Image (cartoon, rainbow, N blue to C red):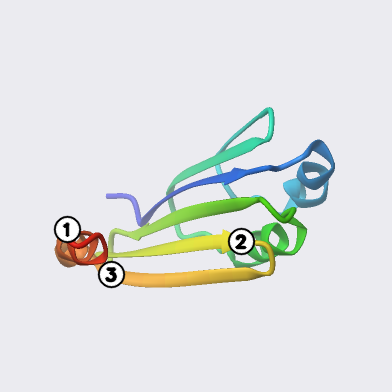
Amino acid sequence: MEDVRVYGDFHRISPEIFEKIKDLMPFEQVDYNGDVLRVDHEGHYILIDDFIEAVRDNLPENGYGHVEFIDQLEWTVTRYTIKPGKIEEKLVRVDNVLDAHQRDHGL
């Protein structure tokens, strides 16, 4: 089993922003198309803090992004929501993901 699975997407990433953050990307797969950056990693643990902080610090006013960090050993999911100047982090046990989603959306 892989240690972690990490998926993310970031919107309103201009070519100038991409140039500033590209060297901080620890992901195996990177897809940059237009103003959307998608990242993907399955394997060993990676550190993403420097990367998401750089995204946070460079996003334009209408930019945003999300990262799902799935720890398959601890069986947790950490969802990062990135907006200009702000990172929100929410940790959920995988066994409780559906319950948390339903509670957050009033289901």
Q: Is residue 71 above or below residue 39?
A: below
- Crowding at dot 3, Cα within 10 Å, few <14 / some 14-19 / many 20+, comes out as some
The answer to which quarter of the image holds residue 73 is bottom left
Where does the image place residue 43, in percent across and percent down from the top left? 42, 49
| Residues under numbered marks 2 and 3 in contact, where contact means CB atoms less than 8 Å apart | no
Residue that carries the numbered disc 3 in the rendered image: 92
Secondary structure under tag 1 reads: helix
Alpha carbon distance from label 1 to label 3: 10 Å
N-term-proximal mark, 1 vs 3: 3
The residue tagged with tag 3: helix, strand or loop?
strand
Q: In percent of the image, x 56 and y 64: which residue is there?
A: 47
Give the labeled residue for mark 2.
83
Which residue is at 60% across, 67% downward? 49
Nearest the eye: 4 or 57: 57
Report helix, strand or loop for mark 2. strand
| Residue carrying label 1 | 98
Q: Residues within 10 Å of mark 1 (few under 14, many from 20)?
A: few
